[in-house]
Amino acid sequence: MSDGWNIGLWLAIIVSGVYHGVNPGMGWPLAVAAGLMERRQSALLAALGPLAAGHFLAMTVILLPFGMLTALQYWSHEIRLVAALIVIGVGVFLFAYRRHPRVLARIPPSQIGLWSFAIAIAHGAGLMLVPMYLGLCTTKPSSMLDHDAAMSVVTNNLGLAVLVSAAHALAMIGAGGVAAWLTYRYFGLQVLSKAWINLDALWAGSLIAVGVVAVAGSL
């Protein structure tokens, strides 16, 4: 792949992180609530840490298995195509089924990190990264791939999975943190009840769009 293509994929990973961050469904209102309940800004900032950690862990858990599969270079095209179809399938499911699991509706402050992990898995946030991640993975012709080379490819791509997750999570918590601070400092939680934008349909559509682009790139 060209350097321009790789730069585009990294930009997509960061932009999707910003998109996840500003989405209230990814948790920044919980940070605002923590700040308002304790009446101190440091409580808001403290809540952002578990949100970022949970999101990072969810991205890593989703990407690592695909990193392992990169050893199967002979089927790399099929792996990318199946991954794209999974993303589309999750998007269609979320578009048709908009109910949120009740267990995720209420969460004590001590479990914000666990909530962030679970919500990122349930919303398919990690899956959205899979096509971009696979586009960045190292590939080699199967005829040149002995055991040592395969292990080197897997190791490099597992490290890449962590790097992609970290870059995405940093962009996510940066955007979410700004939204949380602005709401805490200037608007208050009441703005969510007055100006809440339901992003469920847009979220599902985004998954489908990413999957379709990935399928087109695999053909």
Image (cartoon, grey):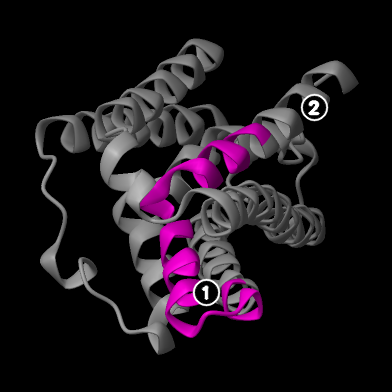
Q: Is residue 215 magenta?
A: no
Count of residue discs: 2
Circle 1: residue type: Gly
Q: Distance between the Cα atoms at labels 1 and 2?
A: 39 Å
Pick whichever of labels 1 and 2 is earlier in the sequence: 2
Is 201 left, or right, of 6 in this rendering? Answer: left
Which mark is in front, 1 or 2? 1
The furthest residue to the right: 3
The circle on residue 6 is 2
Residue sitting nearer the eye, 125 or 106 = 106
Residue 3, image x, y percentages: 89, 22
202 lies above or below 148: above
104 lies above or below 9: below
Residue sitting nearer the eye, 50 or 11 = 50
What span is colored magenta in the figure? 15-44
The furthest residue to the bottom: 110
Is 35 left, or right, of 49 in this rendering? Answer: left
Circle 2: residue type: Asn
Q: Is residue 21 magenta?
A: yes
Residue, disc 1 = 35
